[in-house]
Image (spheres, rainbow, N blue to C red):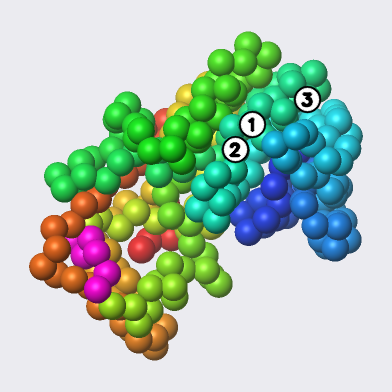
Amino acid sequence: MSKQISVIGCGWLGFPLAKALVTKHYKVKGSTTSKEKIELLFRHKVDGYTIQLTEKGIIGDIKKCLAHSETLILNVPPGLRKNPKSNFAKKMAFLLPYIEASSIKNVILVSSTSVYDDDKTMPIITEQSATSNSKSAQQLLEVEQLFTNSKKINTTILRFSGLYGENRHPATFLSGKIDLKNSNAPVNLIHQKDCIAIIISIIEKEFWNTTFNASTVSNQTKKEHYTSVCIAKKLPIPQFNLSSKSKGKRISSKKLMQDLDYSFQVEL
């Protein structure tokens, strides 16, 4: 197995992932959209490249960023919440031919459990569960299919639930808000540390051509969890509308835990 890995998207998750791979003695190439961040990447022994994916093509030396790597981690935020009209699938379609023409053999595509719908029945969601027909979900699924259909690379799809970490938690955003919905819906979150550990486990165990849901095991409701986090952080607690019917889903990570023999490091 090649000891060089490329990471497209060295942001909130990708940068600490790249640093973790360096400590595992991998040679790491990483991309960022910010020229200012290149120096930071090099300071942490990550060979940095400025790459920007657009709907008209790729800006930056993508060939060099991929050169001589066997494994690629694609961690590109779709940006569909901020800009629902953006075409994430089109951006990724420009990227795929470069990957197929490179030394890359294996790809981990970071996706999202938002490809599954919420429901009043609070279904347990596995990798075989029906997916959503929403426009944003369809874009994510189109990208997943684009990569899994390629005969030149092995692709593992990693569908993370809500991401959080030391300096980022959805409770901070919800703090003090009123009339929030879905109080009894299951909370589906995963810590940055687990995201990184799972990606490294897939690489080391060479678990390719499959799909994993990844969400910390929890029986808490959104109301229970966000209230307790806000109390612990000494923030104003969020107020939920208890009279409205909740919709949600419970993401199952059973397949991931069994196949990778993985135990979550950070409990909710």
Q: Which residue is mark 1?
A: 90
Q: Are marks 2 and 1 in contact (CB under 8 Å)?
A: yes
Residue 143, above or below 8: above
User: Which amino acid lies under the numbered mark 3 shown in the image of this protein?
Assistant: Tyr
Residue 212, above or below 248: above
Under circle 3, the secondary element is helix
Under circle 2, the secondary element is loop
Q: Residue at x 44, y 73 (%)?
A: 173
Quadrant of the frame with the C terminus: bottom left
User: Which amino acid lies under the numbered mark 2 shown in the image of this protein?
Assistant: Asn
Q: Which residue is mark 2?
A: 87
| Position in image of residue 237 (x %, y %) | 31, 82
N-terminal of the two: label 3 or label 2? 2
Quadrant of the frame with the N terminus: top right
Residue 230 in sight here? no
Q: Measure how far apart labels 2 and 1 are at the Cα level.
A: 5 Å
Pick the residue in front: 96 or 10. Answer: 96
Q: Are marks 3 and 2 in contact (CB under 8 Å)?
A: no
Q: Measure how far apart labels 1 and 3 are at the Cα level.
A: 14 Å
| Position in image of residue 198 (x %, y %) | 52, 44
Q: Residue at x 38, y 73 (%)?
A: 174
Q: What is the number of callouts on the image?
A: 3
